[in-house]
Image (spheres, rainbow, N blue to C red):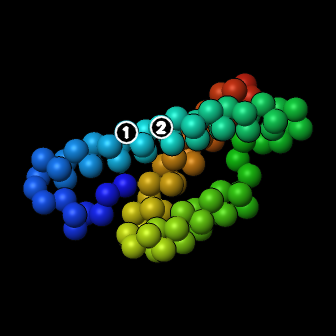
Amino acid sequence: MRNPADLGDMAALRAEIDATDKALSALLGHRARLISRAAELKAENGWPARIADRVDEVIANAMAHAEAEGYDPALAESLWRELVEWSIRREETALGRE
């Protein structure tokens, strides 16, 4: 990742944004595959898709990471709540509990 202060024009800035978006997409794809594996493990153990304490932990972690990275924790909370709810729906489908 390049330092934004080192990007001298909009073309360079946009290229870095595009590269960052591509990296984020790769990470989200990896996370989705992890969620698929979580659904398999939950099925083996008879666990529900939604584990409230874990949801709270994931959201709190996202907000703390946002704070550490210098962006709005409220944005992180909103994004991660959507991501977590999507993940739970994916797990419920895999578990046949939709």
Residue 7, position as x, y percentages in the image: 19, 59
Image coordinates for residue 30, horizontal then vertical, percent: 57, 37
Provide the residue designation for mark 2. 26
Which residue was labeled with disc 1?
22
Neighbor class of circle 2 (other Cα within 10 Å; few <14, some 14-19, many 20+) is: few
Q: Can residue 77 be seen?
A: yes
Residue in view at x 65 percent, y 28 percent: 93
Q: CA distance from mark 2 to mark 1?
A: 6 Å
Whether residues under marks 2 and 1 lie with C-beta atoms below 8 angstroms apart, the answer is: yes
The amino acid on which the numbered mark 1 sits, given as a three-letter code, is Lys
- The residue shown at (63%, 41%) is 88
Viewer-proximal residue among 65 and 79:
65
Nearer the observer, 97 or 62: 62
User: Type of residue at label 2?
Assistant: Ala
Q: Residue at image x 17%, y 50%?
A: 12
Say whether residue 97 is left or right of residue 88.
Answer: right
Residue 70, x across and y down, in percent: 39, 73
Seen in the picture, residue 72 relative to 84 is either above or below; the reply is below
Q: Which mark is residue 68?
A: none
In this view, which residue lies farthest toward the right?
45
Position of residue 32 in the picture relative to residue 13 (left or right): right
Quarter the C terminus occupies? top right
